[in-house]
Amino acid sequence: MTVSLRMRSDVTSENTSQEDLRKLVTKSPAAHRFQTLFGVGLEPFVGKIREVFVPPKAEGVDFEFAAGQRTAFLNLVDPSTAVGSIGPFTFESANKAVMVPDDPGASHSDRVWRRLASVASAGISYREPGLRESLHIAIRRDGANVHLDREGFVAQLDGKIRYDPKQVINHLSADLLSDFAPLLVSSLTVKDDSGQTKFQGTFAPWLEVNLPGSKRMDGSRRGGTEAIAGFRLFGIF
């Protein structure tokens, strides 16, 4: 059994071999979610691994693309980019997108919330719809960042995408704070002899803002804005 207490993640190419980083990627929940969503593994797209994110950061990997794999990766994440042409005719891929772009264009009413949520993302940012754990992918010119957010904020209702402003604030405190204020966030992990996680808890500051008209736990509606600050425990128990 292995017990580790972390206040920041430092599993990078500067202190860990590429072989060991690849082993960590194969066990990452983000890689497993990628396989589930797209039906293919993450490994063929991965060249040099820059960092593997472990708690207290949102788990995942930052990597440079393997040679010639950027276009295939982008087309997989965003099928609308897979455009071909024959003479004067143009056609688009019929593949269905499973991710939602953070920047939908200036005409969308929730663009401000989307851009606020992706402020720390480098490159083109995409998210899996879901209000709990959800995949987040940011694609740069030379590589990508694939990780599993603890707090999602993209709701899908009747085929339409809605961004929940309350959940955006939850995401900022639950997922981004560990990147910018690591000393405020700590994580305890217990693994068995085979490397399987038996317990993983992350303790982090929490900020929640409830708008007028939103429901309380007892079913009543709030008459004004209510802010709640404190600490929250995330993880596998």
Image: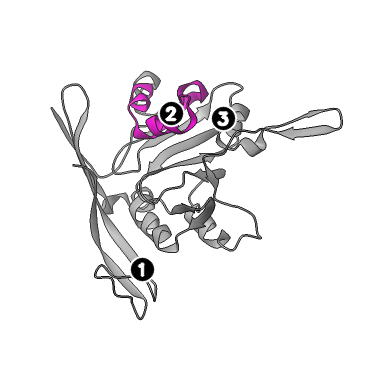
Question: What is the CA distance from the residue labelled 2 to the residue labelled 1?
Answer: 34 Å
Instruction: Tell me what residue is drawn at x 29 percent, y 75 percent.
Output: 220
Looking at the rendering, the stretch of residues picked out in magenta corresponds to 22-51
Q: Secondary structure at mark 3?
A: helix
Q: Considering only vertical position in the picture, is 156 above or below 224?
A: above
Which one is earlier in the sequence, the residue at label 1 or at label 3?
Answer: 3
- The nearer-to-camera label among 2 and 3 is 2
**How far across and down, in percent of the image, does residue 96 sit?**
58, 37
**How far across and down, in percent of the image, does residue 208 sit?**
33, 65
Instruction: Tell me if 192 is positioned left or right of 37 in this view.
Output: left
According to the picture, the residue beneath numbered tag 1 turns out to be 209
Find residue 73 and name its label.
Answer: 3
Instruction: Tell me what residue is drawn at x 36 percent, y 24 percent.
Output: 26
Outermost left residue: 1
Task: Name the quarter where the N terminus is drawn.
Answer: top left
Query: Which one is in front, 128 or 44?
Result: 128
Find residue 169 and name its label.
Answer: none
Q: Badge 1: few (under 14), some or many (20 or more) residues near its Cα, within 10 Å?
A: some
Task: Name the quarter where the C terminus is drawn.
Answer: top left
**How far across and down, in percent of the image, does residue 182 sit?**
31, 49
Q: Amino acid at mark 3?
A: Phe
Question: What is the CA distance from the residue labelled 2 to the residue labelled 3?
Answer: 13 Å
Question: What is the CA distance from the residue labelled 1 to the residue labelled 3?
Answer: 36 Å
Q: Amino acid at mark 1?
A: Val
Which one is earlier in the sequence, the residue at label 2 or at label 1?
Answer: 2
